[in-house]
Amino acid sequence: MIAVLGLVVGVVVGLFIRPEVPAVVEPYLPIAVVAALDAVFGGLRAMLDGIFDDKVFVVSFLSNVVVAALIVFLGDKLGVGAQLSTGVVVVLGIRIFSNAAAIRRHVFRA
């Protein structure tokens, strides 16, 4: 419940303050959000399966974001940033949809 309350407060504060994202970080933000969503859906799936561990979730969340950002950074340095960004989004998107399907099957028993 505390996490949900923190999320709601963070969204409300973000809507009123409207923070500016530095231009240096801008290319990595969408990838970081997709990586974070992958961890959230994986955590929700683990919770429904009864195997959720908060330490595993935090490590997964942080490592997903860091690894995805590093891949995009490396791609930028190699001159193939757009291709690697697309690859990261595709891979994480597949994982998100896979977890969403498992959650749907668990919730609706179908």
Image (spheres, rainbow, N blue to C red):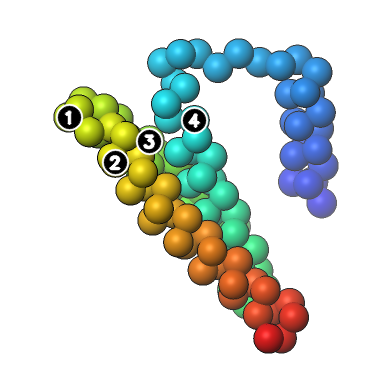
Task: Determine contact: label 1, label 2, CB under 8 Å.
Answer: yes
- x and y percentages locating residue 10 in the rendered image: 75, 31
Task: Please name the residue that numbered disc 1 is placed on.
Answer: 78
Label 1 crowd bin: few (<14), some (14–19), many (20+), radius 10 Å: few
Measured Cα–Cα span from mark 2 to mark 4: 14 Å
What number is the disc on residue 29?
4
Task: Determine contact: label 3, label 4, CB under 8 Å.
Answer: no
Measured Cα–Cα span from mark 3 to mark 4: 8 Å
Measured Cα–Cα span from mark 1 to mark 2: 10 Å
Label 4 crowd bin: few (<14), some (14–19), many (20+), radius 10 Å: some
Q: Secondary structure at mark 2?
A: helix
Q: Amino acid at mark 4?
A: Leu
Q: Amino acid at mark 3?
A: Ala
Which residue corresponds to the image point at 31% horizontal and 34% vertical from the top-left? 82
Q: Kindly report which numbered mark, 1 or 3, lies closer to the viewer in this rendering.
A: 1
Q: Amino acid at mark 2?
A: Leu
Which residue corresponds to the image point at 17% horizontal and 29% vertical from the top-left? 78
Measured Cα–Cα span from mark 1 to mark 3: 14 Å
